[in-house]
Image: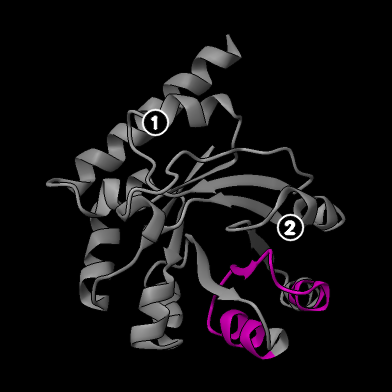
Amino acid sequence: MMIQLALDRMNMEEALELVRTVESSIDWIEVGTSLIKEFGIGSIKEMSESFPDKKIVADMKTIDNAAYEMDLCFQNGADIATVMGVASDVTIQTCLEKAREYKGKIMIDLLNVSDSRLEQLQKYDQAIFCEHVSKDSQENGGHTLIDMRNHAGSMRAAAGGITLSSLPAMIANRLDVMIIGSAITKAKHPADAARRFKEAMNMEKDVKQV
């Protein structure tokens, strides 16, 4: 199980310094949608060049214009880029083709994806599938529990308000990637918070191997 650190709502200097602080406890670095929107596609390149040994996830949330946006992501150092599951099949297929061209991966964001649409997405079994509770839902009293449905993705990920207290339930779902944002980035001591997440995940892994 891997930790993907979600970087949002900060400037690039803060993002880079934060990653340096927690680098030893995380596996993937997510250049969040807000960073890409505010600081441009160069934010992906800057993160990739600063941390060449980490997987870089570009959270583009592509919903159209797939070829152009995927070229931007992968040409600027992304290893993985996101596409919305509510996008059309032709958009998702184009993203997957572009990912193969660059030897990258696609993560399908299942935010607002119905069960019937999820069934249609099962054919994209080479993609990473990510269940996602939106920031607006977290902040405005909406549904905050991550519903881990069955799907055929090559890897399974979850995002949205994950904390140390909710971690055991996430681990029980046998996730491959845990996407963690504010519980680390807004912590008083981010390095300690990241280390506690990693230790908890490793402890659970050790128990399962016994």
Q: Mark 1 to mark 2: distance in Å?
A: 25 Å
Q: Which residue is mark 2?
A: 127
Q: Which residues are magenta?
A: 68-95
Is residue 48 positioned above or below 153 on the image? below
Instruction: Give the farthest residue toward the right.
Output: 123
- Report which quarter residue 73 is drawn in: bottom right
Amino acid, disc 1: Ser
Instruction: Give the farthest residue toward the top.
Output: 210
- Report which quarter residue 72 is drawn in: bottom right
First along the sequence among labels 1 and 2: 2
Q: For the point 24% across and 71% down, which residue is it?
A: 10
Amino acid, disc 2: Ala
Q: Position of residue 8 (x, y in %)?
A: 33, 67
Q: Residues within 10 Å of mark 1 (few under 14, many from 20)?
A: few
Q: Is residue 71 magenta?
A: yes
Instruction: Give the farthest residue toward the front.
Output: 141
Q: Please tell me which residue lies in front, 181 or 19.
A: 181
Q: Which residue is mark 1?
A: 166
Q: Please tell me which residue lies in front, 141 or 119.
A: 141
Q: Position of residue 210 (x, y in %)?
A: 57, 8
